[in-house]
């Protein structure tokens, strides 16, 4: 099977997955106790006629499965309804916040990959030496420290203490301005550290395993220079398991952003989500949770494609 | 000067449990175009020896002393770069398990061409062409199409052929084949051995064949070295080993082979196990398992001697049959009391594995 066919086949599998995600999202949000009407009317007693009118406006008078079908069909067209709180279209609210979270997530992922893979390679190649031990200590710390606490400490030391970074996000700057990007670096590090630690150790162990493989010895016996033995015959194979975990890290980075955005007062969708959960703003919550689900599915899809590219046996 | 001369090679593994003496004062030579067999049980030091030849020993293995001269130059004194120029180019290796010796992530063709590109300095297209020719020469049908196949698309026998193709790709002068047929069934084994024989003759390549299969040795080799616990115990032209083994261990090995027409109910075995290489028995390492062992064997470590004369032998120079047993130096009171019965009148090419047998009391 060629790589194209694999991509197509794997792509088709995501369709039922997406439907499942939407069903679970919808179901969970509706299982939350509390009637949205109360939040719309701010818990005031209402004339039943007016209440019925409001219910009709939001489709809350329909049976649940009709609500679901309505929601999925319009969501598929990019229409997530209107926010109960602000009354503006949900899609607009999300689109105004999403770029911030995306930039932070990409930065966090970048920090992770750029530090985890080279340091994992070094730790593996110089296994059981000082380099390996130092990396082990950092990995342990990175995994053990909760990201929100790390975020607070980074703020305390680098922003408030050393003054290297602003304490609050600059409000008058564009998303891709230097000021905003440098502000984004700290939360990105806070989110990415745990993943970095995990991926570094994984990179190390899978590379140590790979270095012992017979075909690495074959490569050496061919007389290839050590550099190309490692680059060609060790690295590619050891990346296979790392790629899978990297995809899972995308999910961690997204969920991490929810907490860390609050610590850094960062205007992303994570903070939007937490704000709206408190207000039972169902349309917004549903949309954001669905979005996160889609992002994770997409990341896994990409990981599988990369996996198949790296290891030809997967394709057959 | 022989093409390869190994002199007093001592390989040690420094482990937490102690120092493993993997080879002890190992000396032998291989002439150009010669087929040299190395036989022994698992752990006798066969594979370690061959990895040492290419300086491919992994931690914690170290070559403590000795010389490995290839065409007169000591490999152990070469720079890493000089060794790399040798590996795959002048000395190539065929590994035991082809399935794991090939990288699953690259096509078979690429794994052959990369060495060609590196050593012979050929471009993509020329290297590919040469790789396809090599694949053809090892009997891969429609080699040009199979060039882009991945190892998992090859059968076990074809994978072993591909590994041989890698070894042959740069026309080496010496191929070290480390149990190249162990992972294969007998019919494929025969094909692979025929193939090796064919290419060795065609390119006049010397082969060091490591095996524990005496039948393979009989069929394939010119000279044989039998190893026990890191020591060479007997070295001789293949006919001598089969018709007239001179070391009790060799005798034991011979009589433990099942043969067609054999009337024995049980196969002979050599009692006991090969000693731990950290603490080898004093004197002759084999004495705890040797049916002829005497008190002298526990004290005196036997040297390699010419079995005819009992004179100390130089394993690099000598063409005669040499063995390391006190019986040949007259230090033993008893005799090596066994006889070899030749059942088949044919020469060693016919079916020598069935042709000789060491009888023990």
Image (cartoon, rainbow, N blue to C red):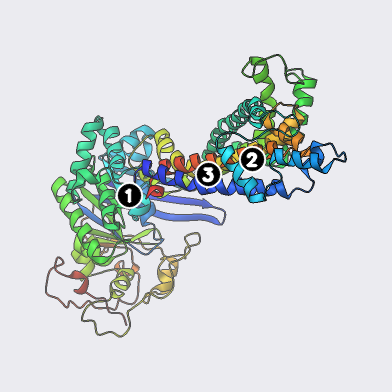
Label 1 residue SS: helix
State how far apart marks 2 and 1 are (Cα).
36 Å
Q: Is residue A291 above or below residue B48?
A: above
Same chain letter for marks 1 and 3: no
Q: Chain of mark 2?
A: A
Residue A133 visible, this orientation: no
- Residue where numbered disc 2 is placed: A252
Q: Is residue B174 left or right of residue B288?
A: left
Taking depth in this image into account, of B178 and A13 the one nearest to the observer is A13
- Residue where numbered disc 1 is placed: B151
Q: Is residue A213 above or below residue A153?
A: below
The label on residue A244 is 3
Taking depth in this image into account, of A153 and A183 the one nearest to the observer is A183
Q: Is residue B152 above or below residue A271?
A: below
In the rendered image, residue A91, in percent from the top left (x then y), is placed at 63, 30
Q: Chain of mark 1?
A: B
Label 3 residue SS: helix
In the rendered image, residue A297, in percent from the top left (x then y), is placed at 55, 42
**Viewer-nearest of discs 1 and 3:** 3
- How would you rate the neighbour count of disc 3 (Cα within 10 Å): few for under 14, some for 14-19, many for 20 or more? some
Q: Is residue B186 left or right of residue B49?
A: left
Location of residue B18 (image quadrant): bottom right
Label 2 residue SS: helix
């Amino acid at each position: 099977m060629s790589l194209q066919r694999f991509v197509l086949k794997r792509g088709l599998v995501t369709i039922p997955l997406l439907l499942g995600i939407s069903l679970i999202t919808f179901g969970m949000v509706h299982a939350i106790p509390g009637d949205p009407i109360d939040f719309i009317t701010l818990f005031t007693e209402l004339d039943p006629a007016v209440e019925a009118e409001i219910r009709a406006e939001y489709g809350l008078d329909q049976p649940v499965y009709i609500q679901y079908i309505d929601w999925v069909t319009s969501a598929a067209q990019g229409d997530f309804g209107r926010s109960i709180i602000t009354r503006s279209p949900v899609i607009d609210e999300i689109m105004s916040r999403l770029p911030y979270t995306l930039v932070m997530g990409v930065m966090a992922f970048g920090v992770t990959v750029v530090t985890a893979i080279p340091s994992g390679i070094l730790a593996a190649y110089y296994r059981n030496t000082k380099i390996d031990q130092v990396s082990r200590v950092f990995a342990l710390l990175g995994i053990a420290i909760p990201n929100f606490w790390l975020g607070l400490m980074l703020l305390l030391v680098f922003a408030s203490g050393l003054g290297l970074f602003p304490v609050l996000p600059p409000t008058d700057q564009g998303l891709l301005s230097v000021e905003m990007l440098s502000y984004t670096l700290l939360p990105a590090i806070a989110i990415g550290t745990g993943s970095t630690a995990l991926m570094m150790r994984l990179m190390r162990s899978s590379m140590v395993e790979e270095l012992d493989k017979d075909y690495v010895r074959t490569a050496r016996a061919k007389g290839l220079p050590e550099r190309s033995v490692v680059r060609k015959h060790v690295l590619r194979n050891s990346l296979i398991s790392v790629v899978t975990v990297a995809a899972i890290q995308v999910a961690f980075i997204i969920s991490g952003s929810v907490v860390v955005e609050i610590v850094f007062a960062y205007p992303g969708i994570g903070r939007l989500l937490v704000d709206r959960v408190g207000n039972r703003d169902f349309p917004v919550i549903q949309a954001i949770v669905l979005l996160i689900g889609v992002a994770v599915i997409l990341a896994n899809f990409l990981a599988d494609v990369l996996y198949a590219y790296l290891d030809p046996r997967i394709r057959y | 000067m022989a093409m390869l001369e190994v002199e007093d090679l001592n390989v040690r593994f420094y482990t937490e449990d102690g120092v493993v003496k993997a080879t002890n004062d190992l000396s032998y030579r291989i002439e150009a175009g010669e087929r040299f067999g190395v036989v022994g049980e698992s752990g006798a030091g066969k594979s370690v020896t061959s990895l040492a030849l290419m300086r491919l020993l992994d931690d914690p293995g170290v070559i403590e002393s000795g010389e490995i001269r290839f065409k007169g130059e000591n490999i152990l004194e070469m720079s890493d770069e000089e060794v790399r120029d040798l590996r795959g180019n002048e000395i190539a290796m065929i590994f035991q398990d082809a399935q794991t010796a090939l990288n699953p992530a690259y096509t078979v063709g690429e794994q052959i061409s990369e060495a060609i590109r590196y050593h012979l300095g050929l471009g993509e297209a020329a290297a590919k062409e040469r790789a396809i020719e090599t694949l053809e020469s090892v009997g891969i049908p429609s080699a040009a199409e199979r060039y882009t196949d991945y190892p998992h698309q090859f059968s076990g026998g074809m994978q072993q052929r591909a590994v041989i193709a890698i070894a042959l790709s740069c026309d080496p002068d010496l191929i070290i084949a480390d149990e190249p047929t162990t992972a294969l069934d007998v019919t494929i084994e025969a094909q692979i051995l025929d193939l090796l024989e064919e290419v060795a003759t065609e390119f006049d390549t010397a082969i060091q064949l490591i095996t524990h299969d005496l039948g393979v040795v009989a069929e394939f080799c010119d000279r044989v070295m039998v190893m026990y616990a890191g020591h060479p115990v007997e070295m001789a032209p293949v006919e001598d080993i089969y018709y007239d083994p001179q070391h009790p261990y060799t005798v034991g090995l011979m009589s433990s082979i099942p043969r067609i027409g054999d009337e024995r109910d049980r196969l002979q075995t050599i009692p006991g196990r090969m000693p731990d290489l950290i603490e080898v028995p004093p004197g002759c390492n084999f004495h705890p398992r040797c049916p002829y062992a005497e008190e002298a064997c526990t004290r005196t470590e036997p040297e390699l001697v010419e079995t005819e004369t009992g004179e100390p032998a130089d394993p690099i120079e000598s063409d005669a049959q040499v063995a390391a047993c006190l019986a040949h130096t007259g230090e033993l009171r008893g005799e090596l009391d066994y006889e070899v019965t030749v059942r088949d009148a044919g020469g060693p090419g016919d079916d020598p594995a069935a042709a000789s047998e060491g009888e023990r009391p």
